[in-house]
Image (cartoon, grey):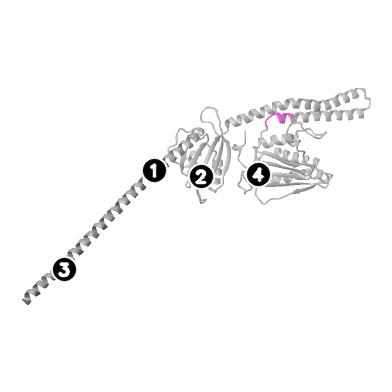
Amino acid sequence: MASAQKRDSELGGSSSQWWNLAARWERSSQNLILAYRSLEKRIHDLDKALEARNKALEASLQERERLQELLVRILEGLPVGVLVWDLHGRLVRVNGTALRLLEREAWEGDGSIEGFLRSSLPENLLHRLLSCVSCGKSCYLEQRLRAKIGDNRPWIRFHGVPLKDGAGKQLGGLLTLEDLTEFKAMEEDMARRQRLAAMGEMAASIAHEVRNPLGSVQLFASLMAEEQSAEERIRMMEQIKGAIKSVDRLLCNLLNLARPLRASLQSLDPMELLRECFQFVEPLAKQKGIELLLESTDLRLEIQADRELLKQAVLNILLNSFQATDSGGTVHAWITARQQGGIAGEGDEFLEINLEDTGKGIPPEVLPRVFDPFFTTRSDGSGLGLCMVHNIMRCHGGSIWIDSEEGKGTKVKLRIPRMSLENIRE
């Protein structure tokens, strides 16, 4: 009986263990099912997130493609030509306007910027443009291209700029091409109209300028007919010769004013030319008690210019300064090298000859007319000096700037491009 009870006790304990194991198994199964469902939900959530992410990415790619297509359309619709290249000089984009301006049928999608422009720009200008951009500077060129079709020779303005990212790191270069042909034609037409309009205004001045020496010739000729003294006749003949020379000088100035000047360009040192001009006017400066100040420079300067024409322009400015400056005043001159936007180094675009005096200055109502032919405020002036300076600078592709304040003196800048023959306006 004791053994039976023991057996029943063992069976009861074993049954309890089995129930415990079964309960634990059921709990584990429930936990596993819950974990699986949680994992399944997590996977479902991840799938939905991934699907949303893919849709967003797809939308972003579509937007990027749309923007890229829009950019291409904008690029192709621009009225200026555009060329883009990378740091290795490989072309990455050329728009249709650039192909048309350069008279190219198509762009094959490869090649270098240098090879693409070699037939359109002279080698020295092309090298200068690409060198400026590669050094991180912008560069402007105005060039008349060689005609490939017919007799048309278009004027093109080339503007090269470096391409940089947001951090300032250079990525390559960009070149814009602007057709200036119509603008140049309008400019020439306007200049022609201005010359014709000025001729009417000049007629009265010319008649007055010529009538005075002719009147002297007539007077002395009539006196010679009555004069018996040989010495007096010789003196009167000299007066007649002087009057004839005045008329001849006036006519020469008129011819130079009417016809376009042609500069005979050569390499010259502008500082040396400025010294020559100062030496030439030094006696007159001493006579008038004016101090001459010529500021030297350490820059090695060289320009392509017509020595005689440029010398004439500087001398005209100096003589005007002497006439406006009283004894004890000064005339100061110096040379600077400038780029389009400001002062820079030797390899830059413009050279400026600066001439400044401490004279009477120019009244504000007179300043806009100082370049008009035959306009002068002096009774003994012809009004052709500054007009000739303007024409001389124009034929060099340069310009003249005058800044003056009445009672405080005048500053004149003669700006000359440091470029080759091909870039000088014809």
- Asked whether the beta carbons under mark 3 and mark 1 sit within 8 Å of each other, the answer is no
Quarter of the image for residue 158 reads: top right
Q: Which mark is residue 173?
A: 2
Q: Earlier in the sequence, mark 2 or mark 1?
A: 1
Q: In this picture, which residue range is highlighted in magenta?
A: 254-260
Out of 15 and 341, give the one closest to the viewer.
Answer: 15
Q: Nearer the viewer, residue 236 or 57?
A: 57
Q: Quadrant of residue 319?
A: top right
Residue at image point 74% right, 31% down: 373
Q: Is residue 7 magenta?
A: no
Which residue is tagged 4? 351
Instruction: Tell whether label 1 touches label 2 (CB within 8 Å).
Output: no
Which residue is label 1 attached to? 59
Q: Alpha-carbon neighbours of circle 4 within 10 Å: few (<14), some, or many (≥20)?
A: many
The image quadrant where one finds the N terminus is bottom left
Spatial separation of the CA atoms under disc 3 and disc 1: 61 Å
Q: Residue furthest right?
A: 228
Q: Please, what secondary structure does the residue beneath circle 1 have?
A: helix
